[in-house]
Image (tube, coloured by chain):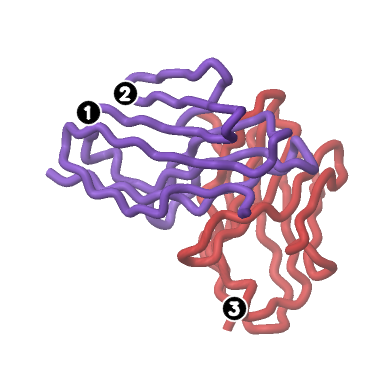
Chain colours: A purple, B red
Amino acid sequence: RKEVEQDPGPFNVPEGATVAFNCTYSNSASQSFFWYRQDCRKEPKLLMSVYSSGNEDGRFTAQLNRASQYISLLIRDSKLSDSATYLCVVNSETSYDKVIFGPGTSLSVIP
Amino acid sequence: EPEVTQTPSHQVTQMGQEVILRCVPISNHLYFYWYRQILGQKVEFLVSFYNNEISEKSEIFDDQFSVERPDGSNFTLKIRSTKLEDSAMYFCASRDSTDTQYFGPGTRLTVL
């Protein structure tokens, strides 16, 4: 099993739609979880950290299920500017200081 | 807003040549990282650096790679003898005492 796996995508959704991305991780000892977004040929940018209790930031909601080793990201009321690749990031089992990136899920929001 | 900067934005080199990629992390950050992303592939961790020494490195980070913080601001990645497969985007990142890593805009390395 790969360390971090994500929905393969791509996701093509109309403006205003709600879209959910899923991520699973193999290391049960992981403590840090993040969602990043990456625009084409740009650097990853932190979207949000993911906490055990779940967290929300405007239109974005992240959930963590430790028992299932599963992380999700929900985007409500999609905007054209949400078009990007969404990266699930988890710290490795060998080191808190080393993070593992998932392969990413591509989102295109269509007018 | 403070940001991580990287130079050059694009480096073209011949196979076998040495390259040095430069990064200026955010000034009050203590942890520094290098990642690479081969075109069309995922971001891969190379190395982390704290307190003037490597704290963690991946299997990619072999003897051809080295990192240095030569002064109080720069953080460099050196590749001693580049190979074709080293062609990739190299990202530097830094973080403070929180978990959040801030990435630089990257250096695109092309090895011919």
Residue B94's image quarter?
top right
Residue B20's image quarter?
bottom right
Q: Are the residues under badges 3 and 2 in a single subunit?
A: no
Q: Which mark is residue B33?
A: none
Which residue corresponds to mark 3? B111
Q: Are the residues under badges 1 and 2 in a single subunit?
A: yes
Which residue corresponds to mark 1? A77
Query: Which of these two is toward me, B40 or A62?
Result: A62
Q: Residue A35: where, in percent of width, then height? A: 49, 36
Number of marks in the rendered image? 3
Q: For mark 1, does the 10 Å Cα neighbourhood hold few (<14), some (14 to 19), or many (20 or more) residues?
A: few
Work out whether mark 1 precedes mark 2 in sequence or the reverse, and give the earlier one.
2
Q: For mark 2, does the 10 Å Cα neighbourhood hold few (<14), some (14 to 19), or many (20 or more) residues?
A: few
Q: Secondary structure at mark 1?
A: loop
Which residue corresponds to mark 2? A59
In the image, what residue type sits under mark 3? Val
Outermost residue toward the left? Answer: A111
In the image, what residue type sits under mark 1? Asp
Q: Residue at x 66, y 33 (%)?
A: B95
On the question of residue B73 being in view, the answer is no
Chain for disc number 3: B
Q: Secondary structure at mark 2?
A: loop
Q: In the picture shown, does residue A95 fall above or below B10?
A: above
Q: Quadrant of the N terminus of chain A?
A: bottom right
